[in-house]
Amino acid sequence: TNLKNSASTQYTNFNYTSMCQFNGVMLGAGQGGLFKACCGTDDNDTKIDAYFIPILTNFGDPRPKRLRHAYISGGDFTGDIKCNVTGDEKTVSPEYTILRESTEGQQRRRVTLGRGLSFTHGSFKFMNVMGSDFSIDSVHLDIEQKQHGIK
């Protein structure tokens, strides 16, 4: 857990029983010994899949809604990334690709989301493509409220 912003990270497929940072290097320990962890752009020539999911939210309104666009601000991408939307913890949209257009610096992207997904509570999943590295500072949403009685 990052103590500055309370964000949690989960590492999977590692045979570590413990991890620590020593002299600025992340180390993992397990039955096979001591390993340098969390460095490099791949894992023994295998691209590293990464994603994050912000909190599930009703976006401040209990009524059903649809998302039209997502605006990614302050993004730094070494390649393309993808996102999808999950509505009411059961319905998942198709994956939308966010193309990397610049070779350096902070980027801002608009993603057009399909209007067919309707939900009360929603969340996003942002994923790398082919092991690309990415960071996103903020996501702003264009939300369309559904009118009463429309399905």
Image (cartoon, grey):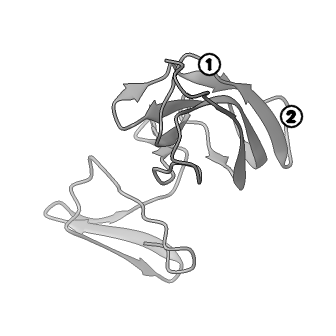
Q: Which residue is disc 2 drawn over? A: 102
Relative image position of residue 92 (x, y in whole percent): 42, 26
In this view, the mark in front (1 or 2): 1
What residue do we see at 70% from left, 39% from top? 78
Q: Nearer the viewer, residue 125 or 150?
A: 150
Relative image position of residue 8 (x, y in whole percent): 43, 65
User: On the rendered structure, is 140 left or right of 24?
Assistant: right
Q: Distance between the residues labelled 1 and 2?
A: 28 Å
Q: Which of 111 and 75 is in front in this view?
A: 111
**Residue type at numbered disc 2:** Ser
Q: Is residue 29 above or below residue 24?
A: above
- Please tell me how crowded label 2 is: few (under 14), some (14-19), or many (20+) other residues with Cα within 10 Å: few
**Residue type at numbered disc 1:** Arg
What residue do we see at 78% from left, 31% from top? 110
Q: Which residue is disc 1 drawn over? A: 115
User: On the rendered structure, is 139 left or right of 101?
Assistant: left
Relative image position of residue 20 (x, y in whole percent): 37, 77
Q: Residue furthest left?
A: 31
Relative image position of residue 16 (x, y in whole percent): 23, 62
Q: Earlier in the sequence, mark 1 or mark 2?
A: 2
Q: Is residue 21 above or below residue 69?
A: below
Secondary structure of the residue carrying numbered label 1: loop
Secondary structure of the residue carrying numbered label 2: loop
Q: In this view, does 26 lie above or below 103?
A: below
Residue 109 visible in the displayed image: yes
